[in-house]
Amino acid sequence: MTQTMIPSAPKRVFIKTYGCQMNVYDSDRMADALAPHGYTPTQELAEADLVLLNTCHIREKASEKVFSELGRLRELQDEKRAAGSDMMIGVAGCVAQAEGEEIARRAPVVDLVFGPQAYHRLPEMLSQVESRKHLHPSLKRAVIDTDFPEEDKFAHLPAAKKEVMVARGLTAFLTVQEGCDKFCSFCVVPYTRGAEVSRPVSQVLDEARRLVDAGVKEITLLGQNVNAYHGTDAAGRDVGLGALVYLLAEISGLERLRYTTSHPRDMDDALINAHRDLPLLMPYLHLPVQSGSDRILKAMNRKHTRAEYLALIERIKTARPDMAMSGDFIVGFPGETDQDFEDTLDIIRQTNYASAYSFKYSTRPGTPGANLGDQIAEEVKTERLHRLQELVNQQTTDFHASMIGKTLPVLIERVGRQAGQIGGRSPYLQAVHLDGSPDLIGNIHQVEIIGTMTNSLVGRLAQS
Ligand code: SAH
Ligand code: SF4
Ligand code: F3S
């Protein structure tokens, strides 16, 4: 089905990615789906024959960005047409899934709109756009595909060529799970990504082996609820994320493994034990709690309490004492009082995060939160966000400073900005700069941390 287009003259696709890591992964999959049909990716918008916006619907600001971008693209398209060339414009991702036809109505410049479950059908959709090209503009309609199909998208997406994978670098994302059944009352993801689906174990292992074969040293497993993963193995058995991680750890050449985003309710013993047993599983865990107030957690439908979250972190740190935490927070959820907010600051103090993302609550149409009374005033949200970020930034600064004098394994990924420098990542995803030969790129080296900068660490190669 996906091979209906005949390879033709080389064309360029420009893909702009918004939102989470899953969209980053998906953008590469779209590029892979288009490659057999003559499209190569470009970073230059002006030379694109096809522009794809891979969009995010999570907050109002994120989804509004799409329409301002489409306005700019319309001007570019007018210029191109005046110069005798053309370009197709597609909207993919979560805004496409949520708003579908509305996008085509609001922005007639759009040729196709398609949701995350339709990426394997992209070449086919482009053929449809091409076949409508000769129609009078008044008759042209965008091609829209926002179905949740029965077939397994991943099984229909082609693998990238090895040289393309090599060029993508030493670290890679690998989506193992998509969608969400949790329905937190503020969140659009269950609607934009659909129900939770896990990829079969063999598919995940095959993709991981291909990545490692192409030189990847570090894989981050992705899912909206990655630790709710429950794939099926060849014998038909159910395999959770904990067990999957042990299987991946056997791949020779794979040196680091991460996973994100986890939900506190799905951190089971198997996964916690994997942190105890497997050195390749990095001691850095993104485990959002959103709020430190039991009342708000309940209203958010998070299905756990503050005490349960704190106890869980204790268990994780017992299994892996060098574990550092990262989190997400929403301030100004409807009904959040000063005391609720103080409870959030308090859980941040108790947990001591290495980093955290924080957001003002954004009312999303169609979610239960949108119908709650007692929405919080914008100034209050702003003030709370500011206070929360001050606290978290201090914790991040302290965390970086606590690295000074330690020797950390650093995956050297690139030459540095200054001559003679190289750079890489610590186990805690901190950028590390040091003097060293580019020959070290591609491997993990022990680096003594001697200083910090705002968002990175400075080190020197440890004597071995
Ligand atoms: N599945 C993950 C979160 C995915 S969305 C989890 O359960 O933790 C990423 C982050 O965006 C969330 O953790 C939350 O902090 C934020 N977010 C989601 N919906 C939001 C909204 N309506 N307003 C503000 N922030 C939101
Ligand atoms: Fe959204 Fe909650 Fe699902 Fe996370 S668990 S994706 S916040 S509904
Ligand atoms: Fe945004 Fe969709 Fe990811 S809404 S955060 S791109 S799952």
Image (spheres, helix red, strand yellow):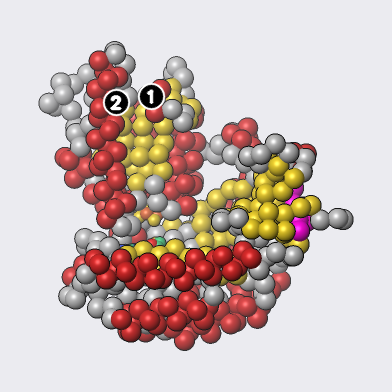
The residue at 39%/76% (across/down) is 291
The residue drawn where x is 52% and y is 61% is 260
Using the image, determine if residue 353 lies above or below residue 417: below
- Find out whether residue 447 is within the magenta segment: yes
Q: CA distance from mark 2 to mark 1?
A: 8 Å
The amino acid at mark 2 is Leu
Give the farthest residue toward the bottom.
307
Q: Earlier in the sequence, mark 2 or mark 1?
A: 1
Residue at x 63% of width, y 39% of height: 417
Query: Residue under circle 2?
Result: 76
- Residue 227 in the image, given as x and y percentages of width and height: 51, 67
Q: Residues within 10 Å of mark 1 (few under 14, many from 20)?
A: some
Magenta segment, principal secondary structure?
A: strand
Secondary element at tag 2: helix
**Left or right placement of residue 47 versus residue 333 in this view:** right
The secondary structure type at the circle numbered 1 is helix
